[in-house]
């Protein structure tokens, strides 16, 4: 894992994108533990699993950190073809294999979200922008690959006179490693939502549910969400 | 000027960002003349000079090309500090000198707009994305500098499995050169709007009006807008 060391005694401002899922929630606890002054940002793009935003909200409230939810759902008319936003395409079930999960790709989603978040960081004069991409995303989401994150980091670094550093500290970790890190940080995983269906309880069938189950299996603990929904 | 040669006999799809101002309108005429299948995109970010969007609309209608206006005005709550979106900060008058015009910088605006436009290009399977940054913008807008455009180009190129090429063919030209090019292309400049104030007639005082006047002076023609508003 990339080391995140905050050397200053005055708190450094940072922005973190939080979806309400387990990766970004772990990241939020992680950077708070490192002493950053954290501003959380979430996006409503009318995702089928919009429920995750309520989890993001709950977590930020619990931690007492400022949280904004930006509505970018009117971009959906432009960004067609993903089952995460189109109600007429069904969510693929089963494992996160490349072919079925490519349907869940919103064109250029991460670049759009990170550009907006970088604008927010610039206006706050924050020096760091964190997001929770992890190694399991690489083959499915082109905009989670390390080479893409690197280019985006270089672009954001020169986007303004005020310099913002993009950091994706989990990009070399898989979801299981993230849960192991989260256990150390005492992240209450019942406060996170992963299922793409966004129903009352997780569907246990979609790629996100499968991936979450594998992560808890690797960490050798029981997913507390099942007991609390 | 960067050469834009469309070698294919089948029309290549391209997306162009059009503000309704003279640079992007000239660019639109330019790429149509080169045989591209063009999709125009404009943004409503609640700019004080929102009037420019009506000009963009008029031009696209006249040319019979598809045009979408995306409302991203709810990002303004995040992106503070610019007189282009805040009604309580007055628009700086006079020449486009660095200090006064920096007030008109919307944090990370171009990266946000281009990320969205790249997502649109990906979903249309367009291969080119054009925007009208020019050399006069460099010192004022960090996100118009050639090094920033280059990084953004490299980022967009790997943002998706479908490759989109970002092009800013006027980035080495000044506004006067653009008008000279536009005259060759018979661009009806009465259909373009520049003034930041967005009143009934151009204010003749703001940086955009000053810059426009200088451009027509360099091209040695009269600005037809004054006669037609």
Image (cartoon, coloured by chain):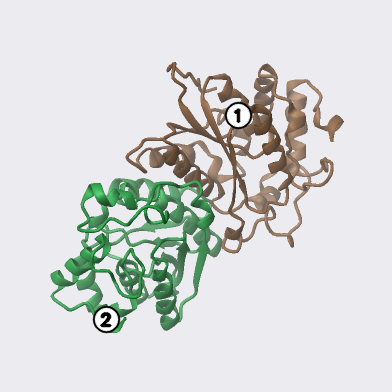
Chain colours: A green, B brown
Question: Residue A184's spot in the image, x, y percent?
Answer: 22, 78
- B123 on left or right of A134: right
- A146 on left or right of A46: left
In three-dimensional space, the C-alpha distance between marks 1 and 2, rounded to whole angstroms, equals 55 Å
Question: Residue A199's spot in the image, x, y percent?
Answer: 35, 71
The quadrant of the image that shows the N terminus of chain B is top right
- B164 vs B83, nearest the viewer: B164
Q: Residue at x 37, y 35 (%)?
A: B163
Residue B110 falls in image quadrant: top right
- B108 on left or right of B208: left
Residue beneath disc 2: A186
**Circle nearer the viewer, 1 or 2:** 1
Question: Residue A193's spot in the image, x, y percent?
Answer: 33, 71
Residue B28 is marked as 1
Few, some or many C-alpha atoms within 10 Å of disc 1 (few <14, some 14-19, many ≥20)? many
Q: Chain of mark 2?
A: A
């Amino acid at each position: 894992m990339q080391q995140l060391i905050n050397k200053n005694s005055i708190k450094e401002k940072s922005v973190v994108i939080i979806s309400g899922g387990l990766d970004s929630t772990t990241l939020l606890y992680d950077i708070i533990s490192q002493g950053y002054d954290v501003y959380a940002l979430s996006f409503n793009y009318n995702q089928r699993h919009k429920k995750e935003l309520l989890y993001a909200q709950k977590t930020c409230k619990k931690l007492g950190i400022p949280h904004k939810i930006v509505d970018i759902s009117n971009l959906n008319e432009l960004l067609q073809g993903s089952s995460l936003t189109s109600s007429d395409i069904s969510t693929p079930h089963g494992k996160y294999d490349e072919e079925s999960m490519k349907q869940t790709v919103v064109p250029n989603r991460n670049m759009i979200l990170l550009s907006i978040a970088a604008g927010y960081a610039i206006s706050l004069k924050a020096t760091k922008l964190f997001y929770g991409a992890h190694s399991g995303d690489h083959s499915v989401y082109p905009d989670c690959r390390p080479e893409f994150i690197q280019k985006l980091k270089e672009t954001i670094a020169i986007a303004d006179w005020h310099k913002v550093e993009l950091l994706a500290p989990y990009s070399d970790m898989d979801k299981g490693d993230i849960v192991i890190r989260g256990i150390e940080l005492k992240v209450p995983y019942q406060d996170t939502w992963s299922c793409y269906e966004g129903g009352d309880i997780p569907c246990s069938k979609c790629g996100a549910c499968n991936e979450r189950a594998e992560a808890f299996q690797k960490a050798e603990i029981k997913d507390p969400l099942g007991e609390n929904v």
